[in-house]
Image: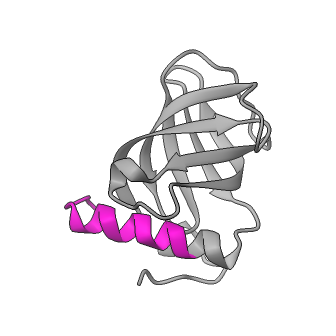
Amino acid sequence: MVEELPPDVGFDRRPARFTSHALVEVRRFKHLPFFCHSAVLLDISLAGFKLEFTGEVNVRPGAQYWLDIPLRPLGIYSPTRVSCKAEVRWFDDGRYRIGGVFVSLTKTDKMVIEQVLEVLKNKGALE
């Protein structure tokens, strides 16, 4: 299992992050396919993520979205996907990258993200 740090931990002690190249969707609404953008998940931890959109988008820090990660390409077959609410912390409008943190993860969401981290760790993702 991946070590989880308390929320008051600063950037110098953030949770381990693992690189990824998984395709994900960033949605305004959890169950509606409208206002949905494809992106490449660059890295992920229990605290948050960094991703790069596949096309031009305009995102503002503080906005909340649903990060939808298909799990089958990672070799996780049940559940087939995880959708977590996330808040954008920063946006690079030159490369269309965002960094975000997860908001109100359920125990199930945490367990699934831990599975994703284990898969990435076993595939040799850098920390």
Q: Residue at x 52, y 19 (%)?
A: 94
Horizontally, is 81 left or right of 66 in the view? left
Horizontally, is 113 left or right of 89 in the view? left
User: Along the line of sight, which residue is nearer the eye, 57 or 120?
Assistant: 120
Q: Position of residue 126 (x, y in %)?
A: 26, 59
Q: Position of residue 70 (x, y in %)?
A: 49, 47
Evaluate whether residue 15 shows in this view: no
The quadrant of the rendering that contains the C terminus is bottom left
State the image quarter where residue 5 is shown. bottom right
Farthest residue to the left: give it: 124
Q: Position of residue 32 (x, y in %)?
A: 77, 34
Horizontally, is 117 left or right of 94 in the view? left
Q: Residue at x 49, y 75 (%)?
A: 13
The quadrant of the rendering that contains the N terminus is bottom left
- Residue 112 part of the magenta segment: yes
Horizontally, is 22 left or right of 105 in the view? left
Location of residue 76 with respect to 107 vertically, above or below = above
Q: Position of residue 89 (x, y in %)?
A: 68, 47
Evaluate whether residue 74 shows in this view: yes
Q: Residue at x 45, y 53 (%)?
A: 71
Our reading of the magenta stretch's main secondary structure is helix
User: Along the line of sight, which residue is nearer the eye, 112 or 4?
Assistant: 112
**Count of labels shown?**
0
The stretch of residues the image draws in magenta is: 111-126
